[in-house]
Amino acid sequence: MPDHIVTSFDVELKEISRAVVEMGGKSERLVADSVNSLIKRDVTLAQKVVLLDDSIDQMQRDIEEKSVLIIAKRQPVAGDLREIVAAIRIANDIERIGDLAKNISKRVIAIEGEYHPQKLVRGVEHISDLVLEQLKEVLDAYAGRNAAKAVEVWGRDSDIDTMYTSLFRELLTYMMEDPRNISVCTHLLFSAKNIERMGDHATNIAEIIYYMVTGQVLPENRPKADASSDTTVAFPGD
């Protein structure tokens, strides 16, 4: 390709990459705000998260449309094609993370005014800290095209699963100890599952980054440690 076309193509690729990074940053803030709204019982903040999710959805659509246009116009191959396809796939995972943050905020609105001991949300806060760290690191790995860092994030998925399983059991215990906890704990269980799924999307992004940079695929079976479905609830008298 002539030099001016190559330069123009490079600019387009960088714009797509910047858009993905910006989208990731906004989604990261939505996650933090949704968890803060849960911890602080801040319904106003929760409502803000629900409204702002639309902007994440629009960014995902814009990235997809621009990427498809570049493919049609430039017909990229090899590494350039991997860059564009990765942007589309990563934007899709980020959009799902935004949806999960919105789901948490909707539950904050649903439990407004209910009996809500602060100790019930501590576990959710801890798992969210871990997921937010993973999101930050995987977005840094994308911005820096750092395959090694992506692999590091990919390998820590089981840490989130282990914490989720522990939290699942803890919340079930609170529900059995005091029936007043049942409604709130049910919402917290769904919120915790949403956060655990965010970790899965961060891991998906890590896999995409690794392929984008190296052209190689990570092993299909990544470490998983979510045993919540195997948990047996022993109610008093059983």
Image (spheres, helix red, strand yellow):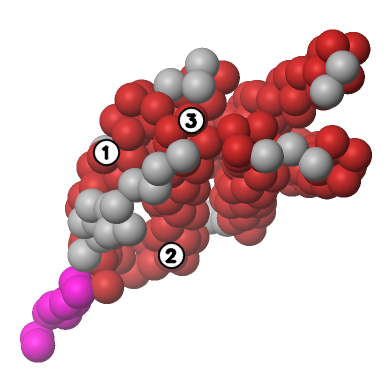
- Does residue 199 appear in the picture of this structure? no
Q: Amino acid at mark 3?
A: Val
Write down the region rendered in magenta: 230-238
Nearer the observer, 230 or 173:
230
**Residue on which disc 1 sits:** 156
Numbered label attached to residue 213: 3
Residue drawn at (46%, 61%) of the image: 190
Count neighbours of disc 1 (C-alpha within 10 A) and say few if under 14, some if 14 to 19, many if 20 or more.
some
Image quarter hosting the C terminus: bottom left
Q: Which residue is the extreme one toward the left?
A: 237
Residue drawn at (43%, 21%) of the image: 146
Locate residue 214, reporting x and y percent. 43, 33
**Residue on which disc 2 sits:** 186
Q: Secondary structure at mark 2?
A: helix
Locate residue 99, reporting x and y percent. 65, 51
Q: Amino acid at mark 1?
A: Arg
Q: Nearer the viewer, mark 2 or mark 3?
A: 3
Answer with the quarter of the image where residue 170 lies: bottom left
Q: Is residue 118 left or right of residue 114?
A: left
* Disc 1 from disc 3: Cα separation: 20 Å
Q: Main secondary structure of the magenta part?
A: loop
Locate residue 105, reporting x and y percent. 63, 47
